[in-house]
Image (cartoon, grey):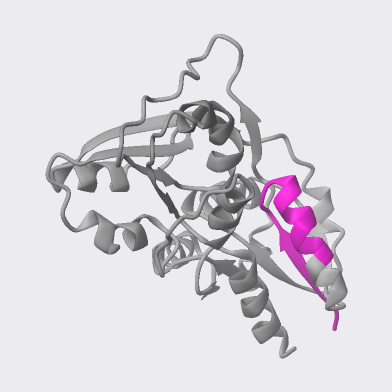
Amino acid sequence: MTTTVILTRPECDSLRLASRFKSLNIRTVVFPLLKIQELSVGEPLTAPKLKQGTTVVFISANAVRYGMPYLTEQLGSGILPIFIAVGARTQAELAKWGHLADRPIRSDSEGLLDMEVFSNLHHAEVVIVKGLGGRDVLAKELVARGAHVQEWSCYRRYWPELNLNTLKMVEGARIIQASSGETIERLSGLLASAWMTDLYQYPVVVPSKRVADRAKALGWRYPVCAKDAGDDAFIESVSSLLGA
């Protein structure tokens, strides 16, 4: 029986993954649950002032894409911040701008908090580059540890209108991607409203135990934890499920 991988990340990320799966002869359907856009005209996009030794944390590759154009002009004045990337893809995006960045073993807020750089933060300056909304676990804990934290949102995520017939027309088994708690919530709500909860029987690949627990609570029978939120970890999980 043919198995189709349902890719739910933003279109550019899903198309990149689809290309990699095609090289592995694995069928995919691109079904982006999330879209990314710059903040609208009139919304504040003034970059935070970086100081010598400021730790700048990028919580996604999109944070680099949308944030670095505003931060770069400060870096020519001799300012040397410490760059931290949440994961491998974010680290690679920073490398395109010519900046080396450290990253945690686990690609999420909890992984960042386990890094040695955040173990002694008395009066340290930390800037978190992110999208509007999202979890505030990282900022709250860093403040509790004594850091001066500034969160800077440089893009927004939003849920586009979707045609669920795209999923109804898929034949055979599915493996579904859900790269965040927000994504599994959104997907579950859409399927429930369209009487398509039969899809809950298929594996849903998630990036962490936290998201897996949320998937189980929503009724998914087979959440599968990838090693992290990166492309390689997702492909490895799918290949394992397929016995490839």
Q: Give the quarter of the figure containing the C terminus.
A: bottom right
Horizontal and vertical percent for residue 51? 31, 32
Judged left or right of residue 5, residue 107 is left
194 vs 23, left or right, is left
Residue found at x 55% / y 42%: 64
Residue 77, percent from left and from top: 44, 28
Whether residue 243 sits left or right of residue 40 in the image: it is: right
Residue at left offset 30%, top offset 62%: 115
Q: Quadrant of residue 160?
A: top right
Could you tell me which quadrant the N terminus lies in? bottom right
| Res. 105 image quadrant | bottom left
Q: Name the residue nearer the viewer: 166 or 75.
A: 75
Seen at 17% across and 48% down, the residue is 121
- Residue 130, image x, y percentages: 46, 38
What residue is at 46 percent from the left and 47 percent from the top? Answer: 59
Q: Residue furthest front?
A: 78
Magenta span of residues: 1-19
Count of marks overlaid on the render? 0
Up the image or down, 172 lies above or below 124; here it is: below
**In the image, residue 25 above or below residue 216:** below
Q: Is residue 66 above or below residue 214?
A: above
Q: Nearer the viewer, residue 66 or 169?
A: 66
x and y, in percent, of residue 218 in the image: 48, 59
Q: Would you place residue 62 above or below residue 230 in this image?
A: above
**Quadrant of the rendered structure where residue 52 is?**
top left
Residue 203 visible in image = no
Residue 147 in the magenta stretch? The answer is: no
Confirm whether residue 127 shows in the render: yes
Name of the residue lying farthest toward the bottom: 243
Q: Nearer the viewer, residue 179 or 90?
A: 90
